Image: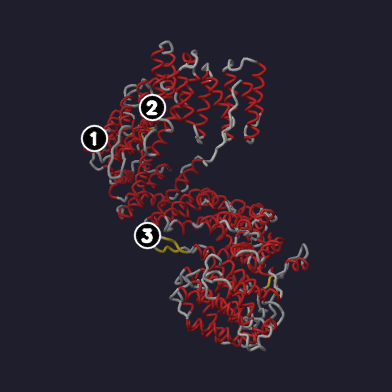
Amino acid sequence: MSAMEAVCDGEEPEVVTEACLLSEFSERGEARALINNLPDIHHDTVSREATIEKFVVIMDRYQEQPHLLDPHLEWMLNMLLEMIRNEKSPPPMVHLCFKFLYIISKVRGYKIFMQLFPHEVSDVQPVLDLLCRQDPKDTETWETRYILLLWLSMTCLIPFDLSRLDGHLSTDPGLNRESIMDRILAVAKSFLRVSDKSRDAASVLVSKFVTRPDVKQKRLGDFLDWCLTTISQTSEVTMEGTVTLDGALQSLAQLFKHGKRDDFLQYAPTVLQCLNQKRIAESNQATLRKLGVKVVQRLGLTFLKPRLAKWRYQRGSRSLAVNLAQSSVTESVEATKPDLESVSQEEDYDIPEEVENIIEQLLVGLKDKETIVRWSSAKGIGRVTGRLPKQLADDVVESVLECFSFQETDNAWHGGCLALAELGRRGLLLPSRLSDVVPLIIKALTYDEKRGACSLGSNVRDAACYVCWAFARAYEPNELKPYVNQIASALVIATVFDRNITCRKAASVNILSPQGTFPHGIDILTAADYFTVGNLNNCYLTISVYIAGFEEYTKPLIDHLVAMKVNHWDGVIRELATKGLHNLTIQAPEYMANTVLPQLLPMATGMDLHRRHGAILACAEITHALYELATQNNSWVTDFLSSDTIEGLKNIHQKVCRISLLGFGGELMRPAVCCLIEKLSLSKMPFKDDPVITGWQWLIDDSLKNLHLFSSGARRGIQDAALSALAALCLQYYQVEPGVADVEMQDQLVSQYLLALESPEVLMRCGCTLALGSLPPFMIRGKLQKILPGLQATCKVVQKAASLTEARRDAATAMSQVCVAVGVCAQGSPDRVLCEGNIRPVYEALLGCMNDYSTDSRGDVGAWVRAAAMSSLMDVTLLVVASAPELLSSDLVQRMMCCLAQQAAEKIDRYRAHAGTVFLRLLHSTDPAVRYSSQSLFEYLKGIQQDATVLQQFGDTLLRIFRDNLRNDRVSVPLLKMVDQILANGCFDRFASEESHPFCVELLAICKEEIRKSKDVQKLLSCIAVFCGMVQFKGDVREKVLVQLLMLLCHPFPVIRKMTASQVYEMLLTYDDVIDDDQVLADVMASLSDTNWESDIATVRTHRNQLCDWLGVPRPILVTKTSPQ
């Protein structure tokens, strides 16, 4: 619907351009080649499947623009039919051609495509004979039967009596064969019973064939009798019975659709009676119920005279050309008013009594559990109502409106919306009814019903958007003017606040529908277009704020959140709604303070759990938003709030505690009340020294100490909310003056949390360790020598406390939080800051955590502790390096980096990745890490340059590690990078002074083996760097290294060729003794820099061979693979 709307409105040309990029059938050459190639590939299964797949990909691109194929359908059809008609074409080839024809018809639609089939008299017999030769049970060739049935449908349109094709059948009694008419009917009946798509084509054949004048006269009654007999005697219990019923109902629907009313009117009562007796509407098969509705509505149109109701509302003409011809620039097309005299004349004819039964069945179909049945019923109601007198039509509308009762299911609401859209689109819903309809549609736009663990109503809201779309195009703007503000507000609300993305997009495309009468439609559509509304968070927190800037929408948006979303059954929606209210407060602060908060306060202490939860969060968010607004204006939040509101906010905690803070209710209420405490504290509410503070503190402590009483899924949320509340509460109410703690509260909190660290309950330890880490700096200073040893003791692994893994994890995290909070001062007091007197125990505790390999039934739970310790080490180290790097001793850094390197080689992927991230962060962010890791290695190697024995031992060790880990990428790739750094720093100059030193020869051999047949780009790039560094070695090694580099210049991967050329260029600049002749050096450098090494191999090889000649090394010989005889 959305694409159609965008095109119709012309409202978003960019979107339309993106959706309709194709302008012609650009793959016609490729399609022609594929069709021409069919005779060559039909016998090879692999080639056949590949060709079909290519053709399907090409054709599927035009699913949304099939009209682009129209100029090319004829030549594709003719090419394929020529192959089919060729007597030399084997059966597999013929079936493949029919498969291609089906692919084309699927994209373009069979109604258009079948018209192109040749339908001469000479085509009837061959097509019929070919169809009769097909095996209906062959599942591989159903496309052949489908296309042949469509082709036969077209040949049936020849304007000659079929008896002429029978020759002397009737005069020669010796010939025992059927007439063409009987054969076609027999074929149609047989294919109406098959289970594949040929059944659909057989119903098309029936509609074309049985409605022929000659066949209708002789066989119509018999065929209808066959259909009704089949329906009456077939049971839907079996799959075969369902398929047979499907075929019979399809053929009836097609016949009554395409046949003349005068021919079928006499049979309509009998057919209706048969369907009523069969009770198709009660079938378990949705397809049968849909076909039943189709047949019933066609029967209704047969009973009623084929005339358009003159009383219907008409908005101009259905033809755009006529509208443009009749209107000028300044005048608009006026609605055509019904002629009362003609209406009275129209109502003179009698309506058959069967019509009432038909309408009743269609109304029941609107409430069906399947969408396809409801949609078909809605269209049937629209078609039938269009032929009824005004009064009866109004009765139908009244019956449709009864679907919008809250006693009805969501299916009835959805069907009712579809029916109203159809009635409005056809002009059958008169403007006088809009006052009844619009309120129902606005309710439907917000329809949401919880059913078990899921929600019902998204289809209702989507259909309500369709109704708005239909009304906008059915009525003149002045007819909708009284309702446009209501509709606009409801659509905007659906655009930004509906939880279903489809509904938000459906609502957004309606924003410009009412012909420019939508207030600020263009501005809103710019912010809330079809794609922007895809992100729910963006809708609630950003787009809604922009739209609320327009006065017409401010209060409706806020009221909707308060009335419908704060109490929503989905917790995510409730939380988003409260955050949305926070952001919307700036648009209407007085309304929020004087109207919304007084509405929310009773809800916050009510009995409904979801309503109470959402209201508490909303009170918290709105209060904090008012505080932020007051701060900008240099005032206090109390300037916005009345004394009753302040008292109500203060009493929420006490009233909620009376209801329940345990069980499922507690899992929602505790985080909500903690959030309220946090926001009221941050808002600096005037509650200092009030007894409520004691109650708040009790709730926070109780939540942290009793986490084990709640489900595992709720614990984290309760803990995080309590910790945030604790930090905010301390900042606002536990300071005597800025930076000075209330000593009594400081002693009380620190003491109780440290005491809880010794509890046998692991979750109590977790909550209280993180509570210590969440305390503000002024609450920690003066107590640091108690807090740090307590956390360090909690980090230690004790044999009896193997199950306290989570506590050790959180203690490691809290330790870094405490250190970061108090800061670093090298000569400071150990009781107030991190300093020389207390830094080593912190590192010792964290490094001890790095060796926690505890396991239990959950697996390697010690990994949680190690991960937390890595993060804490990074935070503390970065803090120390920034302020007092002299506190880090070399042994601490060495141990830390070794532990991180060890963790980077662990089994679990995410912990390896985490260790690598921390290692790199420290390596590139801290001078001590660099100084005591890589530089120390280089300094050591420089120091042993004069000791040949030690240097040789180091080289042998390096080669042994390399050899032992050959093709072990986890070791070999980092080792290659390290060797490159060692070579670049001149650490092997002693080896370079000797020709063909054994170390150099062995290193080259191992490197060659490591990259042999490798496709790892990183490994190849690392080895190229090593080869370039090895050019400093003299003798045969240098020549062999150059050979390797020149071979890599013709590597299959373009990136390797390009990087090799770049590295060799830099190598020649670095080592100027590789080429003695200055002219040759200039030529080599020019070739390396000017050649496009990403070209094809043949071109690159020519330049590479020239480089070999200049450098005096043999050209590599291309080895051709020979297959064994």
**Quarter of the image holding residue 504?**
bottom right
Q: The N terminus is located in which quarter?
A: bottom right
**Labels 1, 3: front one:** 1
What residue type is disc 2 on? Met
Which residue is identified by label 3? 608
**Labels 2, 3: front one:** 2
Which residue is identified by label 2? 897
Label 2: how many Cα within 10 Å (few below 14, some 14–19, many 20+): many
In the foreground, 601 or 913:
913
Q: Which mark is residue 798?
A: 1
Specify which label sits upstream in the sequence, 2 or 3: 3
In the foreground, 784 or 470:
470
Give the residue drawn at x 43%, y 16%: 941
Give the residue drawn at x 34%, y 52%: 667
Q: Which mark is residue 916?
A: none
Secondary structure beneath label 1: loop
